[in-house]
Every structure is written in C-alpha cells, then in structure tokens.
Amino acid sequence: MEHPSGNGTEAAASAAAAEVVDLVSRLIRFDTTNTGEPETTMGEREAAEWVAAQLEDAGFATTYVESGGPGRGNVFARLEGAAPERGALLLHGHLDVVPAEAADWQVHPFSGAVQDGYVWGRGAVDMKDMVGMMLALARQYKRAGVVPPRDIVFAFLADEEAGSTFGAQWLVEHRPDLFDGVTEAVGEVGGFSLTVPSRAGGDRRLYLVETAEKGLCWMRLTARARPGHGSFLHADNAVTALAAAVARLGAHEFPLVVTESVAEFLAAVSSETGFDLDPGADDITGRLDKLGSIARIVGATLRDTANPTMLAAGYKANVIPQTAQAVVDCRILPGRRAAFEAELDEILGPDIEREWITSLDSYETTFDGDLVDAMNAAILAHDPQGRTVPYMLSGGTDAKALATLGIRCFGFAPLQLPPELDFAALFHGVDERVPVDALRFGTRVLDHFLRHS
Ligand SMILES: [Zn+2]
C-alpha cells in the first residue's frame, strides 16, 4: 500500500545512495574508540556534533544530549509523518567503535579509505554503515519534503560498545522523553544477506532480521581463603579453589534450548537448503558449519554460554593470597535466567562468591506484523530473489535498553553482501570494511522500508 509521502521520493533515494559512501567514510575518520573506560573514551562528542551539523544543514532541529559523562554525545532528530497517532518508528545507530590496532591493518583503521569497492575502517560494519544510511536518508527526506507514513525518530548514540551505560541505558533511565511516542525500533546486526545453496540448485539469498538477543551478564567470581607462606603445607588456597571452579564452568555445556526465533531460523534455512538442521539432532552444532561463519553466532543461540575471560590473584611468588578473582562472560537465552543461575551455583559450589558486574536481560519479539511486512516488501522490491528470516543474536545491542521502555525492537540494517565475504569476522575484526554496493543497496531498501512502514 502506498502512503502519502510527498514528491520526489525516488529522487531522494537516489541522492541518498549517492551520498552514503562519503558519509560513512567521513564517520569512520572520527576516532570514536570506546576503551570501556570513560577517562580514555574520546571522539563521541566530535562525531555527534558533526552528525548534528549534517542534519541541521538539511533543515532539522536537533537535540544534543550527553549521557552520564562529559563528551558522551548523543543526537536526536524527529521527522514528522502523516499519521503521528500510529506511533513513531525509532532508527538508532551508535557512534562509538571498539579499539583497532593500526599495525595489524592493510589500511589505517581511521582512514575511511574507499578502495577496491569497499569503505575501510573501524566501524564500517559496526555500525557507521547504518549511521551513514540513516543520515543520508534523513538529509534527503528533509530537503525533498518527504512526509513518511509515521513519525521517524533518528537517534545517534554513545557507548554501545561498553554495554550502553553512558549511552542508551542512561538515556532510557534519565531522558525517556526523547523516546516519546516511539512504539517500534530498528537498529543493528540484522538485514544483512547470507547466501546459502538452494535445494532447487543455485544459490538463495536470505536476509537475517534480528528478532531476539541473548542476555548479557558479566560475572565476577571470588574465592577467599587463608593467606600464608608459599613454602608451607597449605591445603586452603584461594587460587587453587578459584582455578578449579573456573575450569569446571569453562568446560560445562548448558542444555540445548530452542527458542521461537531460533526454531524459525532453522526451519527456514532447512526448507531453503534441504540441510537437516533439526535442533534435536546430536550433532546440530556440526551441521550448522555448512552455513559458514554465521554458524558461530547461530550455534551460540542454542544454549546459554559462560566463557571465563579474566583472572586475577596474588602479588608475590612466595605469598599465598587471601583472594582470587575471575570474570566470566555469561550469555543467557530468553526465559533461562533462573535456571541458569541455579545451574551456576551447582557448578561453582558454596565456597565461590559470585556477583553480576553487568546484567542486561535477553530480548525476544515475534516475526510478524506490519513492520515485518514492510521489511519483507522492501527486500523483495530490491532483491526479488531474497527472503527475510528471523534470527537471534548471541551478543547485545542498544535494543536491550530500548526494550525496557516497551519498544519493540528489530535489527534491520540492510546490506546485500558478496557470498564469499566472511561478514561475521568483520565485526570487531581486522580490516573491517563494507562493500560500496552494499551501502547503496541498503540505502534504497531502507528508503523503501521507511516510506511503507
Ligand atoms: Zn554495534
């Protein structure tokens, strides 16, 4: 169905597609490295101010907000739609990136180089690609006087890469007014294509829409025992107790639990490829390998995981310390929190203390309704051979914070990728880059989606 949308929308999409590569390149040149420490995280303010200037240049009024600390810049802009009573759609992207070690890269990670058909640099897929697409469309809509069917809120956010404490989490807690009227949201780690062999011969392009996220819970373990001299008999050693508990936990496999999103994903891929991806099969993890590197994500959505990541104890070779500590990265499936904690206590035993350093709940929504229909239609309009498929992300995004306001969240940052590109490896990876053609494709798909949402 067409909605009133003003004139010149196709022209606006073309203009946005022409501009998007430059915008993404320019965004990458802002070093917005998030070190995880507020004292050393810089660049978000400069990037946010530049984004605000680009929006204002096109005629937007913008709101700049710092979220819980100096320099943690966020920018908001609202485009009025034809039917504001339908509730606003939020498009969100984060401006921060994870660190990059320049010596490891073929090009400088903050060069934004455009070469060999790619835009290169830290953030190219996580997620200055989507930020550039949002910015390009917002600018062109405003300039061309496009009136979308419903209000659109564009949000450019800080601190996603360190758990959103000084970004989305702070904003939903302290400035919920910025999200007034927002009922649904679209952000990152979805909308990209995965090419699989078709059972009918040839290839099939699936576009993965994120409908669920595992919970992100970082845990600190502490063992306390009697300190003493390293040369004596000493049975009660905190380092030994902690190491044994960490080893038990690291080797533990949590039970297979198939949630709605994962079941739908496996059923869709099975029907397209003819692969038997019955989650009940003993070697389901091995069978997933046929899907390529995405198997690392999908495999991690079949169970809870608890990966030990940090250890700390002691201060001298001949002193048995009083305490030993570890940090464990736990990722918990929707609906599994209580069962996970009970299992944890059994594995760790009574002598190991545990506390949550970060605790962000899982999230899951259904793959249906008008907004999903609009995603399908937008993909089909630009890739008639494509098919959208829901999936669960093993990691986390700002959607976790936004969902606490009752907003229904999806990951849909469309990119049509070359079949051979190891997309999953580019996230936080060396030589992160995004195909120029994928950015232009994504901008057109996003445009179609926004005009029909
Ligand atoms: Zn991201």
Image (cartoon, rainbow, N blue to C red):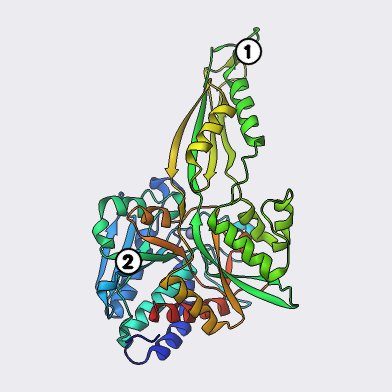
Q: Which mark is residue 18?
A: none
The 10 Å Cα crowd at callout 2, few under 14, some 14 to 19, many 20 or more, is some
Look at the image and tell me whether residue 190 can be seen: yes
Residue at 38% x, 87% y is: 2
Q: Nearer the viewer, residue 340 or 164?
A: 340
The disc, 2 or 1, on the residue closer to the chain's N-terminal end is 2
Look at mark 2 in the image and give the residue it sits on.
49
Query: In the picture provided, is 299 more to the left or to the right than 89?
Result: right
Q: Which mark is residue 230?
A: 1
Q: Position of residue 421 (x, y in %)?
A: 66, 69
Eyeballing the image, is 294 above or below 372? above
Residue at 67% x, 71% y is: 272
Q: Name the residue at the top extreme.
A: 232
Q: Check disc 2 and report its element: helix, strand or loop.
A: helix
What kind of residue is marked 2?
Glu
Query: In the picture provided, is 310 more to the left or to the right than 410?
Result: right
